[in-house]
């Protein structure tokens, strides 16, 4: 049990945009990585084999196979380094921890699909894609209405002007 002061401190660090997922689900974790001076996003896709609850300290263990070798990573769900989490496939398991998958190879590692939850996930992904497409269209329309042009169109125009100036 956390003290009331710890609850107040942790409540400020808890993210609200985390999708619902369970042990057995296949997820994509988009993690922000510093690459020199740049910041890029790296995707880690795998099966959730464990969840450890605990407010802002909540973690998940994600396992995937890379060239026949199992790779597990533990992610802090509410970390600022996690850009987003996408649920790809709902799995149906009867255990809280799937550590037994470590000893299995091939088809034995397959997790049953949860058809009911998968249909809900598909609907939510479709809606999110529609919202993102609509927002992109509105942004493009606003940019063209304001007399702005895309970066590539601006570069082309500047090149043509530079070539025309050289010819004169």
Image (cartoon, rainbow, N blue to C red):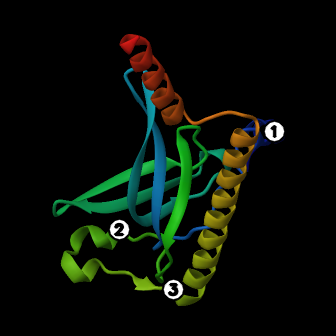
Q: At x 70% / y 46%, what residue is drawn?
A: 139
Counting other residues with Cα less than 10 Å from the Cα at mark 3, is it few (<14), some (14-19), or many (20 or more)?
Answer: some
Residue 72 tag number = none
Residue beneath label 1, please? 8
Q: Quadrant of residue 68?
A: bottom left
Judge by depth and name the residue closer to the eye, 56 or 157: 157
Horizontal side of 162 relative to 58 (left or right) equals left
Q: At x 57% / y 68%, what residue is drawn?
A: 21
Rendered location of residue 79, percent (x, y):
57, 41
Horizontal side of 146 relative to 140 (left or right) equals right
Rendered location of residue 38, percent (x, y):
43, 25
Check whether the beta carbons of the residues at disc 3 and disc 1 lie within 8 A of each other: no
Q: Secondary structure at mark 3?
A: loop
Residue beneath label 2, please? 99
Q: Is residue 151 above or below residue 104?
A: above
Circle nearer the N terminus (2, 1):
1
Can you tell which of label 3 and label 2 is closer to the viewer? 3
Check whether the beta carbons of the residues at disc 2 and disc 1 lie within 8 A of each other: no
Circle nearer the N terminus (3, 1):
1
C-alpha gap between disc 3 and disc 1: 36 Å
């Amino acid at each position: 049990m956390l003290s009331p002061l710890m609850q107040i401190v942790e409540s400020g660090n808890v993210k609200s945009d985390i999708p619902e997922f369970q042990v057995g689900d296949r997820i994509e974790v988009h993690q922000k990585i510093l690459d020199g001076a740049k910041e890029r996003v790296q995707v880690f896709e795998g099966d959730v084999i464990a969840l450890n609850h605990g407010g802002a300290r909540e973690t998940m263990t994600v396992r995937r196979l890379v060239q026949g070798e199992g790779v597990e990573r533990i992610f802090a769900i509410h970390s600022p380094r996690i850009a987003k989490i996408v649920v790809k496939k709902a799995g149906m398991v009867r255990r809280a921890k799937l550590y037994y998958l470590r000893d299995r190879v091939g088809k034995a590692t397959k997790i049953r699909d949860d058809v009911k939850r998968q249909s809900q996930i598909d609907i939510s992904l479709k809606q999110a894609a529609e919202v993102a497409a609509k927002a992109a269209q509105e942004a493009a329309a606003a940019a063209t209405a304001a007399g702005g042009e895309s970066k590539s169109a601006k570069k082309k125009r500047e090149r043509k002007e530079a070539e025309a100036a050289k010819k004169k």
